Amino acid sequence: MSGPNPETKMQFLFALRSRGVTDSKVLEAMEQIDRGPFVRGIFSDRAYEDTPLPIACGQTISQPSVVGLMTQALQVSPRDTVLEVGTGSGYQAAILAKLARRVYTIDRHARLVREARMIFEGMQLANITSLVGDGSFGLPDQAPFDRIIVTAAAEDPPGPLLAQLKPGGIMVVPVGQSDTVQTLIRVRKTDDGLDYDELRPVRFVPLLEGLGKEG
Ligand code: SAM
């Protein structure tokens, strides 16, 4: 992270640790990726608070500690290919790019993908491929994935995404009705099938069908 002053940076990292983000590689990645450029306009002065904030297209950039906890739960290793459904601001994808070999990120809003891509270029994160589309169907051409992270809430883990997970792979996804508190779950694909862990209550915008309207 280069943007905030040392005190703000220390408080940002302290908030992450105090909310359970303890994995040193995840903390290092979150220290390297400045959240500032991902938050625009009137909310930019709140970029280093541990809070979700509005972004374009009526969407949100997630709370940093939730980003950290989800990244930690995903157990990414440097050889992994990761799919993120729900690019939003691009912040989560940028952190994943520091931990994985390649990151594919997809959003139904073309504007969000365009803006995130510019930030990735500015940060020289060349291992991120960002695409516009309905991510509930995954990316069959690039599958299978070692890790899949969904940053919008689905009623159930989408079947096509489970199918695109490698054996031994891990998927982290918030599940539940969109207007209530949802549960973050981790799914592991084993030789015998799928193992599910409930991690914590969360609140995400819904995973919607089709493409978003431009604007
Ligand atoms: N990961 C983001 C970040 O770091 O800023 C936050 C994601 S925001 C909470 C959820 C995103 O999921 C929104 O940008 C929304 O457009 C996207 N989304 C919702 N349904 C989708 C779908 N079916 N396919 C792709 N993206 C979707």
Image (spheres, rainbow, N blue to C red):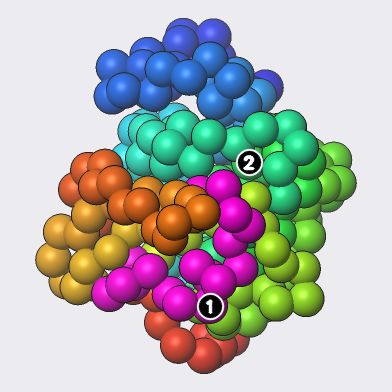
Q: Which residue is mark 2?
A: 96
Disc 2 marks which amino acid? Leu
- Residue 81, how many percent across, how many down? 72, 50
Disc 1 marks which amino acid? Pro
| Label 1 Cα crowd, 10 Å radius (few <14 / some 14-19 / many 20+) | some
How many numbered dots are placed on residues in this image?
Answer: 2
Q: Quadrant of the N terminus?
A: top right
Q: Quadrant of residue 105?
A: bottom right
Rendered view: 169 above or below 154 = above
Q: Quadrant of residue 130?
A: bottom right
| Residue sitting at x 41%, y 82% | 208
| Residue sitting at x 43%, y 75% | 158
Q: Which residues are magenta?
A: 153-171
Q: Quadrant of residue 68?
A: top left
Relative to 190, 54 lies left or right: left
- Residue 177, how many percent across, how many down? 19, 73
Relative to 165, 67 lies left or right: left
In this view of the protein, which residue sits in the foreground, 50 or 181? 181
In this view of the protein, which residue sits in the foreground, 105 or 4? 105
Q: Quadrant of the C terminus?
A: bottom right
Q: Which residue is mark 1?
A: 160
